[in-house]
Image (cartoon, coloured by chain):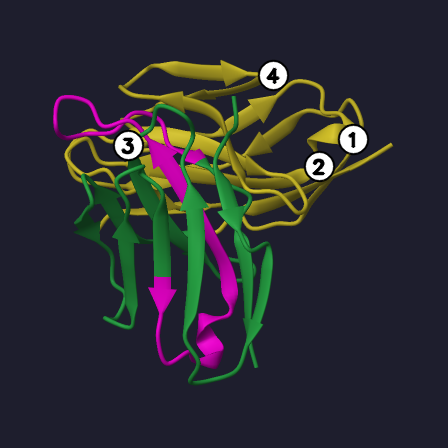
Chain colours: A green, B yellow
Amino acid sequence: DAGVTQSPTHLIKTRGQQVTLRCSPKSGHDTVSWYQQALGQGPQFIFQYYEEEERQRGNFPDRFSGHQFPNYSSELNVNALLLGDSALYLCASSQTTGGKGTDTQYFGPGTRLTVL
Amino acid sequence: GNSVTQMEGPVTLSEEAFLTINCTYTATGYPSLFWYVQYPGEGLQLLLKATKADDKGSNKGFEATYRKETTSFHLEKGSVQVSDSAVYFCALRRNRDDKIIFGKGTRLHILP
C-alpha cells in the first residue's frame, strides 16, 4: 500500500517565477492538506482540499493556490516567488468522515523548494 | 489564539537515558494532541496521540499523557536508543477544525 507521495523531491527557482508541486494521497484517502515548513520551524497550515474544493485556508497570501483532481491527487501552486518561500512543503492525506472532520493525517516526504 | 510551546533543543542524551520533552498548549475547547517525529530527510510520522483529558498515548516505548489541568502533553521514554535521534513535534488539532497546529520542534541527539 503506497503512502503519500510528492513530486518533485527538490526544486530550485528564482524570484518572481511560478512553481507547481504535486501530491498523491494514500490509497483510500479523499482529503489533502498542504503545509509549509521553514528551516528550523514547525509546519504551518496552508490549505486543505476535499471534494475538489478548498475547505479551509491558513494565513497565506493569494499567491498560494491549489487544486484537487477527481482522483484526489492535488497540486500546490505558488506565483511570484519570494526568497521567503524557500521551505519544505509537506502534503498530508486523510479520510473525511461524516462530511466533516478528518481522521489521522499521514504526511508525505515533502518537496524542498529553494528560491534564489 | 491556539498555539503549542515545546522545549527548545537540541537535546543530547546518552543511549539508555530517560527522555522528557516538555510541551504545553493553548487552545479553546478540547483539542486532540499529537506527537509527530521527523527523521532526517523524511516527512512527518505520527508517533502517538490523545483525544481527551487523562488519555495516555503510547507507541514504540514513547508515552504522553493529556493533562488538561496543566495544559501539557509531555513526551517521555524510559530508555532511548541511537535510532530515536530525530526532530519531535508536539501538535494540536481543535475538534471543530481540521488543521494541525505544530510547535517549533525539538531536535534529539542520542549518543552511543
- Judge left or right: residue A49 versus residue A26: left
Q: Which mark is residue A30?
A: 3
Name the amino acid, label 4: Lys
Label 4 lies in what chain?
Answer: B
Secondary structure state at the residue bearing disc 2: loop
Label 2 lies in what chain?
Answer: B
Q: Disc 3 vs disc 4: Cβ atoms closer than 8 Å? A: no
| Quadrant housing residue A100 | top left
Q: Disc 2 vs disc 1: Cβ atoms closer than 8 Å? A: yes
Q: Which residue is mark 2?
A: B85
Q: Position of residue B13 (x, y in %)?
A: 75, 36
The answer to whether tags 4 and 1 share a subunit is yes
Q: Which residue is at 35% across, 26% downward?
A: A104
Q: Which residue is mark 1?
A: B82
| Quadrant housing residue B37 | top right
Label 4 and label 1: CA atoms lie apart by 14 Å
Q: Which residue is at 33% across, 28% downward?
A: A29
Q: Position of residue A54 (x, y in %)?
A: 19, 50
Name the amino acid, label 3: Asp
Q: Disc 1 vs disc 3: Cβ atoms closer than 8 Å? A: no
Label 2 and label 4: CA atoms lie apart by 13 Å
